Amino acid sequence: MPVLYSFRRCPYAMRARMALRVAGIEVELREVSLRDKPPELLTASPKGTVPVLVMLEGGVIDESLDIMRWALEQNDPERWLAPGEQMDALIAANDGPFKFHLDRAKYANRYPGTDPTHHRGEAVTLLEPLEERLAQHVYLFGDNPSLADIAIFPFVRQFSRADAAAFDALPFRHLSAWLTTLEASSLYQAVMIKRTSALGVSCQA
Ligand SMILES: N[C@@H](CCC(=O)N[C@@H](CS)C(=O)NCC(=O)O)C(=O)O
């Protein structure tokens, strides 16, 4: 079985686990501590981020979006890849600017001299195009989930939880409903089940 090094609460790892699961690709899940990464993970991918997929033939994929695409190229039963390249810009805006502002709004103490309120405002601005899309259909590219929905929603979820009251006060009715639907999905619930690590101690989170 391929091995997936993962961290339960990591949004990148969440989206990789969801794509692997929808594709029906079984993996041996190895939950890691980010403070004490296993040497096998660092040997497979010295950059030391999760998720990392080590395939049976020994190939390694260490970018979450690449893991998603690889999984869906094997099997895409829900047609997540159907919208094609039109998803790229939205995913890039999430992984680039949105993530940049999310980190500075949420973990202000890690970025001395930055103003979390400013970054929060910038993040909200970047959510507006999502709200506009979701006012037209249930998911970002139509009435079925796509790669873009699954790639983006773990980060929007993180933002919504950084200050839940402030998020709820935003005029993002459709975005909130989208988030609720994806969080309630059996796919998301399945990849968030808490497991016990090989050492017999509960995983973090
Ligand atoms: N571009 C990478 C980013 C992955 C990433 O940054 N993951 C975080 C956890 S959410 C990580 O492993 N950080 C390293 C650390 O905290 O030491 C991907 O898409 O897989």
Image (cartoon, rainbow, N blue to C red):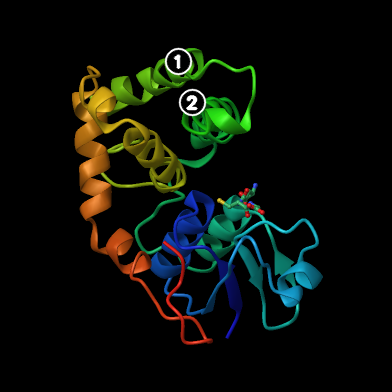
Rendering quarter of residue 108: top right
- Which is more N-terminal, label 1 or label 2? 2
Side of 185 where 87 appears, left or right: right
Residue hosting label 2: 105
Side of 152 where 1 appears, left or right: right
Q: Residues within 10 Å of mark 1 (few under 14, many from 20)?
A: some
Q: Is residue 169 above or below residue 202?
A: above
Q: Is residue 193 above or below residue 64?
A: below
Q: Is mark 2 within 8 Å of ligand 1?
A: no
| Nearer the observer, 196 or 178 | 196
Whole-Å distance between the Cαs marked 2 and 1?
A: 7 Å
Name the spot of residue 177 as percent of width and height, x first: 19, 36
The answer, for residue 202, to whether it is visible in the render is yes
Rendering quarter of residue 40: bottom right
Q: Quadrant of the N terminus?
A: bottom right
Dots 2, 1 in contact, CB < 8 A:
yes
| Nearer the observer, 108 or 7 | 108
Name the spot of residue 154 as percent of width and height, x first: 41, 45
Instruction: Please tell me which residue is depicted at 64% across the width and 61% down the height of the picture.
Output: 35
Name the spot of residue 77 as percent of width and height, x first: 37, 64
Q: Is residue 100 above or below residue 148?
A: above
Name the mark on residue 117: 1
